[in-house]
Image (cartoon, rainbow, N blue to C red):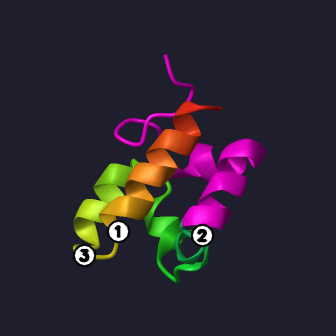
Amino acid sequence: MATYDLSTTPLRVLLDAPDARAVIDELLPELPEHPMIQMAYGMSVDSVLAFAAGAGDPERVTALRDALNRL
């Protein structure tokens, strides 16, 4: 079982965990710097990307999911 799940793990947990944050910074560097990110802290990454229609390149999201699954 993966430690982090993009469909259930709150974004804040991912951003606060150094290993997960490093993956996010590498693959979706614009996410932590988004001006409205604090509003999304309690949401899963999948939920955040659903609200930001078109913002998540499917290949980068898949790479993020794969990288987090390896942690």
Q: Earlier in the sequence, mark 1 or mark 2?
A: 2
Type of amino acid at the residue the image marks with label 1 = Gly
Element type where label 1 sits in the image: loop
Instruction: Tell me: 63 left or right of 57.
Output: right
Image x and y of residue 56, in percent: 35, 68
Number of the label disc, if any, that sits on residue 9: none
Local packing at callout 2 (Cα closer than 10 Å; few below 14, some 14-19, many 20+) is some
Q: Earlier in the sequence, mark 2 or mark 3?
A: 2
Image x and y of residue 24, in percent: 60, 59
Q: Residue furthest bottom?
A: 35
Q: Which residue is mark 3?
A: 54
Residue 9 visible somewhere in the drawing: yes
> Marks 2 and 1: in contact by CB < 8 Å?
no
Instruction: Tell me: 63 left or right of 46.
Output: right
Local packing at callout 3 (Cα closer than 10 Å; few below 14, some 14-19, many 20+) is few
> Marks 1 and 3: in contact by CB < 8 Å?
yes
* Highlighted range, magenta: 1-27
Q: Tell whether position 50 is magenta.
A: no
Give the residue at x 47% y 78%.
36
- Which of the pair 14/71 is nearer the observer? 71
For marks 1 and 2, give the CA distance.
Answer: 13 Å
Type of amino acid at the residue the image marks with label 3 = Gly
- Determine whether 13 is above or below 70 in the image: below
**The C terminus, quarter of image:** top right
Q: Total marks drawn?
A: 3
Instruction: Tell me: 41 left or right of 24.
Output: left
Q: Which residue is mark 2?
A: 32
- Which of the pair 49/70 is nearer the observer? 70
Give the residue at x 53% y 32%.
69
Number of the label disc, if any, that sits on residue 56: 1
Which is in the foreground here, disc 2 or disc 3? 3
